[in-house]
Amino acid sequence: VEPETTEAVAGEPGVPTPAEGDGERPSEEGPAPLPADAVARLTMAAEEALEAGDRQAAIDGFLEAAAAHAAAGRTTAALDACARVVTAYPDALEAQEALVHLYLELGWRSLALEKVALLDRLTDLGSDPLLRARVLILARELGIREPADGEPVGEVTPSPESASGGPA
């Protein structure tokens, strides 16, 4: 098993490094964490799929590894796995969504908001209404009011609840 680093997150400009021990706590919900050797096998299989050009297997493998790391409280390693996907496939919305949730778990709300704004711009360029709907759901989770037609999420002012850090 390779040591956890944040180097893979370098694909995400401006991502701060968690303080010593920050983000490295077991998840309180979800399935029991996988053993480290099982997660290493998932990561290795995802790397092999990436090298072979098998997009979906690589995405699925890295996201499974990210979920396993997150369940074990290894948020930094989960970020690395998601960043690996985003670096290879920037249009992999499921990896981008996973990053948003990890950012929120770490308390990096501004990065989560920036990511949602970026995703909004990317999905606005495409013609897939389902992808656009997923981005709007993420925006809603962050407490951003629904944009008017043609108004990008990134330019929407936060609702009063999100501006104060959430509902009272």
Image: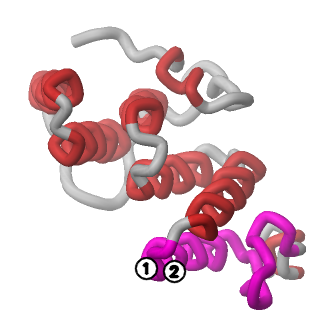
Up the image or down, 75 lies above or below 109; here it is: above
| Residue 118 drawn at (x, y percent) | 67, 54
List x then y, in percent, for residue 167: 76, 80
Check if residue 153 falls in the magenta segment. yes
Q: Is residue 61 magenta?
A: no
Residue at 21% from the left image edge and 12% from the top image edge: 1
In the image, residue 55 lies at what x, y percent? 23, 41
Do we see residue 33 in this rendering?
Answer: no
Residue placed most toward the observer, 75 or 147 = 147
Residue 133: mark: 2
Residue drawn 89% across the image and 74% down it: 157
- The answer to whether any part of residue 107 appears in the image is yes
| CB contact under 8 Å: marks 1 and 2 | yes
Q: Residues within 10 Å of mark 2 (few under 14, many from 20)?
A: few
> Any mark on residue 108, and which?
none
Q: Which residues are magenta?
A: 127-156
In the foreground, 54 or 19: 54
In this view of the protein, which residue sits in the foreground, 7 or 71? Answer: 7
Per the model, the C-alpha gap separating discs 1 and 2 is 5 Å
| Mark 1 neighbour class, 10 Å CA radius: few under 14, some 14 to 19, many 20 or more | few
Helix or strand or loop: what does disc 1 sit on? helix
User: Dot 1 corresponds to which residue?
Assistant: 130
**Residue 96 position (above or below residue 154):** above
Residue at horizontal 39 percent and vertical 32 percent from the top? 88
Taking the image as shown, residue 86 lies to the left or right of residue 1, namely: right
The amino acid type of the residue labelled 2 equals: Ala
Tell me residue 84's x, y (percent).
39, 30
Secondary structure under badge 2?
A: helix
| The C terminus sits in image quarter | bottom right
